[in-house]
């Protein structure tokens, strides 16, 4: 028997996701009532099945049909799934942009990357300037 915290930990899902799956009919509600409610190994197995289909890109409505036996079981090739991600853009320097997934980098990490790129560009500018000075000295 598992409480929701332990079920969440064992399944690798959040409590909110588990409750959402119950609400959508993908997962049976816990046994018992109120604070005495509990989940079983069957709940954990069902969550693992849902996760397996979900990671293959199968929509939840299709997963529900599969689990209810109303839809043929399908295998999805993960390489052919179209994924969408929200990206952020940081203009680091004129002509240089950094693209990254939202919330992927922390603000201090972004500052370090920004500082590093600017230092590389500035050192490049200094090298070009000294090269021009050398050429002018030669001429």
Image: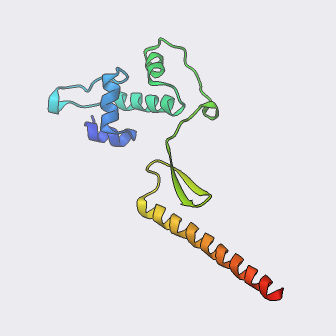
The quarter of the displayed image where residue 77 is located: top right
Q: Is residue 117 left or right of residue 109?
A: right
Q: Nearer the viewer, residue 60 or 36?
A: 60
* Residue 44 x/y as whole percent: 37, 32
Q: Nearer the viewer, residue 56 or 95?
A: 95
Residue in view at x 42 percent, y 60 percent = 107
Residue in view at x 40 percent, y 31 percent = 47
Check the image and report above or below for 3 versus 53. below
* Residue 18 x/y as whole percent: 33, 32
- For this orientation, the residue located farthest to the top is 70
Look at the image and tell me in which quarter the C terminus lies.
Answer: bottom right
Q: Is residue 133 left or right of residue 38?
A: right
Residue in view at x 34 percent, y 22 percent = 24
Q: Nearer the viewer, residue 48 or 20?
A: 20
* Residue 75 x/y as whole percent: 59, 25
Look at the image and tell me in which quarter the N terminus lies.
Answer: top left
Check the image and report above or below for 65 versus 9. above
Q: In the rendered view, how is the structure colored?
A: rainbow
- For this orientation, the residue located farthest to the bottom is 137
Total tally of numbered discs in the picture: 0
* Residue 105 x/y as whole percent: 46, 56
Q: Is there any visible trace of residue 40 in the rendered image?
A: no
Q: Is there any visible trace of residue 4 in the rendered image?
A: yes
Check the image and report above or below for 30 versus 93. above
Check the image and report above or below for 115 versus 70. below
């Amino acid at each position: 028997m598992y409480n929701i915290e332990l079920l969440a930990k064992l399944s690798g899902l959040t409590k909110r996701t588990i409750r959402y799956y119950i609400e959508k009919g993908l997962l049976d509600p816990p046994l018992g009532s109120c604070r005495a409610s509990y989940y079983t190994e069957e709940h954990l197995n069902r969550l693992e099945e849902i996760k397996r289909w979900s990671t293959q890109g199968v929509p939840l409505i299709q997963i529900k049909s599969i689990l209810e036996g109303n839809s043929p079981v399908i295998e999805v090739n993960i390489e052919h799934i179209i994924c969408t991600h929200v990206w952020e853009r940081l203009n680091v320097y004129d002509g240089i942009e950094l693209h990254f997934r939202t919330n992927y980098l922390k603000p201090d990490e972004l500052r370090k990357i920004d500082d590093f790129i600017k230092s590389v560009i500035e050192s490049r500018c200094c090298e070009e300037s000294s090269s021009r000075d050398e050429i002018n000295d030669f001429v």
